[in-house]
Image (spheres, grey):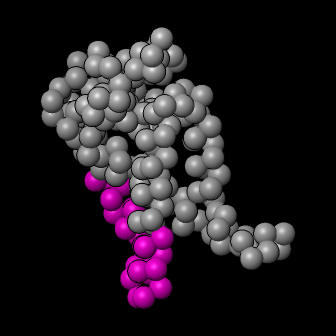
Amino acid sequence: MSKKNTIDSSPIGSIISRFSESHTTATNKLIHYITIPLVSFSVLAIVWAIPFPHLDLLGKFNGFLNWASFLIAGTFYYYYRMSPFLTYGLLLLVFAFSVIIVSLEKFHLQGGPELHIIPMAILLPALLAQVAGHRGERTTPDASSSLRSLLDGPLWLMDIIFRKVGLLKSR
């Protein structure tokens, strides 16, 4: 079996299918194509901004470990269990997010707003846009699936991107 066939037969296939059921209209898809990365970035940046204690055992590496490190590790454990292949694309995305977050930290040191301010200003409109996008859908996700959607949304989007560029077989 080739790599291009493994996604649909793995646990990720049911996640993608379930997520796709509540994202069928062109408008809602477009909204989610834009807002899923914005929400993911915002959550990562907000968690990154939570003060992390100074730990002597880290020595010169203090400052390289923060709460976002644990969020990334746990999330990628989940992603890798669902689809190792899609995880590679998501790693690149988180790397890009990390570069932007570090740039925001540097911007703050030069007199810009604190790190959490910009992501919070992005998060609220992005979440509201997602809610608005679901208004035209036949089925809408329930509130209890919000955390699951936060994890599964990036997988769904990466699956779409990989299929568009030919890394996965189209359905």
Count of numbered badges drawn on the protein: 0
Foreground: 101 or 23? Answer: 101
**Residue 30 percent coordinates (x, y):** 20, 38
**Residue 159 percent coordinates (x, y):** 37, 30
Whether residue 14 is visible to the viewer of this picture, yes or no, is no
**Residue 137 percent coordinates (x, y):** 22, 24
Against 121, residue 125 (above or below) is: above
Against 51, residue 84 (above or below) is: above
**Residue 8 percent coordinates (x, y):** 42, 15
Which residue corresponds to the image point at 41% horizontal and 38% vertical from the top-left? 154
Against 159, residue 73 (above or below) is: below
Could you tell me which quadrant the C terminus lies in?
Answer: top left
The magenta stretch spans residue 166: no
Whether residue 100 is visible to the viewer of this picture, yes or no, is yes
Q: Where does the magenta region start and end?
A: 102-125
Foreground: 142 or 17? Answer: 17
Which residue corresponds to the image point at 63% horizontal and 42% vertical from the top-left? 74
**Horizontal relation, residue 27 to residue 16: left or right:** left
Q: Main secondary structure of the magenta part?
A: helix
Which residue corresponds to the image point at 41% horizontal and 88% vertical from the top-left? 111
